Amino acid sequence: MEGLNRISGDIPWTEPAITQVWAEYIADNKSWIEKMGGNIHLFAVGGEHPEVPGSESIQLWHYNGAGTRMMKSLYEQVSQRGAEVRHNAAAKKLLTNINGDVVGVRVETGEGHRMDIGANRGVILACGGFEFDERMKLNYLKTYPAYFYGSPANTGDGIRMALEVGADLWHMNCCSARAVGKFAEYPWSFPLDFGGKGWTARLLKSEGNPEPAGYILVNRYGKRFTSENFKLHCLYYELGLFDTQRLEYPRIPCYWIFNQSRIEAGALPLTIAGPAGPQQLYHWSQENSKELESDWIISGATVEELALKLDIPPDALRTTVNTYNGYCEKGHDPEFKRRPLDLIPLERPPFYAVRLWPGGANTRVDPVATPTARYSIPMVTPYPDSTGPVSWARSTACFIPREAAIWPNASPLGA
Ligand SMILES: Cc1cc2nc3c(=O)[nH]c(=O)nc-3n(C[C@H](O)[C@H](O)[C@H](O)COP(=O)(O)OP(=O)(O)OC[C@H]3O[C@@H](n4cnc5c(N)ncnc54)[C@H](O)[C@@H]3O)c2cc1C
């Protein structure tokens, strides 16, 4: 891990002290949830990256009732402690004293009223990421556009507030994301259920439980570019390839190509999470008919007809599909080593496509203090060179709710 972390000489991706705190708290995750009465069960063993030493020690636990139930129980914890929750109160500015220390926050209510709230012990920034701020995405992420399905209220306010009081930023271009569907009518994106049966089934897939339908991902030239057994939380990085000869990103957008079998296997988006799931922001038709009519799903009676509608060279897509079907017949994908179990041919017309874009649940945000910055928002450890007041801020939009809870817990604020 030390080797992975030390990217450039003495500059680490993450300060070891931060990693240490993270590791200690994350190992305590299960008992933390259970102590609060949370009801969880072991769901799978092993990390997403089996090639990383120690990944077999990772356990995946599922909250019974999923995210909505988990949020309800966290909310109950807040109520039990008598904490006052103010809705419709958007944080706008960190208030500082004459020394530059943060002593409160300015909020604006739904009716446009402004209110200054003093802090007894500290202010914790938890306004999520910048997934709905186009300018920040353009400047901070590795690819553009990128579309997300977290809270549309996450417009990077925490970053602006932290910068105003002298914070620096790190990890802004680290993004745990993949390829998602995005349609002009809505601001958010959709996580997709590529092979059908849901993400859960994919993780637990076995010989007796294959995906119902075949599919491939192709670039703008109709070519496959990765194993469709992609890493759910980092395919995003592969989409960012830039072609300096053509001066373009050939994988933005890329295309999800499938056939009638996938249409018949049910709604295309994931329903365990996202706008077509518990968030219920959009009701996707079970037989995909509404979305076919809206041209969210593009169809063609033949592969060539589909390619023409996508502006892909028809011969190229035909060759790709033929080659892929040949791999399916042999049960071996020499190009990308896709699992034999998932080599399901694309033979049954009509053929379909959905445009895919880089994106995922949310962005990360890591305001961090500079040694000279004088402010005191949540701190994990004092900045190593700091002699001033608390000067290490850590984190909104950590990729796991528990991670988001670690930093305030671990800080001397003990919030
Ligand atoms: C559909 C979905 C599925 C996910 N599944 C998983 C999973 O299975 N496992 C996992 O580990 N993680 C998962 N994640 C990621 C995880 O939920 C996030 O990483 C985590 O919620 C981030 O926590 P946060 O507190 O930093 O930000 P958020 O949870 O995004 O909270 C930020 C809050 O701040 C509010 N806000 C924004 N601006 C202001 C302002 N100016 N003033 C006041 N409030 C403001 C927003 O309304 C929002 O409520 C998923 C995310 C999504 C969207």
Image (cartoon, helix red, strand yellow):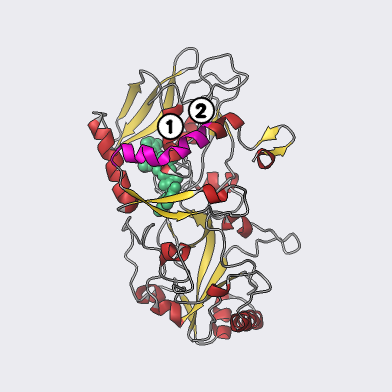
The three-letter code of the residue at mark 1 reads Leu
Q: Is residue 401 visible?
A: yes
Q: Residue 212: x percent and y percent?
A: 44, 76
Residue 58 higher or lower than 90, as above or below: below
Compare residues 290 and 1 and report the one nearer the observer. Answer: 1
* Mark 1 Cβ and ligand 1 under 8 Å apart: no
| Quarter of the image with the N terminus in it | top right
Q: Is residue 102 left or right of residue 78?
A: right
User: Which residue range is magenta in the image?
Assistant: 21-37
Dot 2 or dot 1: first in sequence order is 1
| Quarter of the image with the C terminus in it | top left
Q: Residue at x 54, y 47 (%)?
A: 137
Could you say which disc has been placed on residue 393 in the image?
A: 2
Figure quadrant, ligand 1? top left
List the residue tagged with mark 1: 125
Could you say which disc has been placed on residue 100 in the image?
A: none
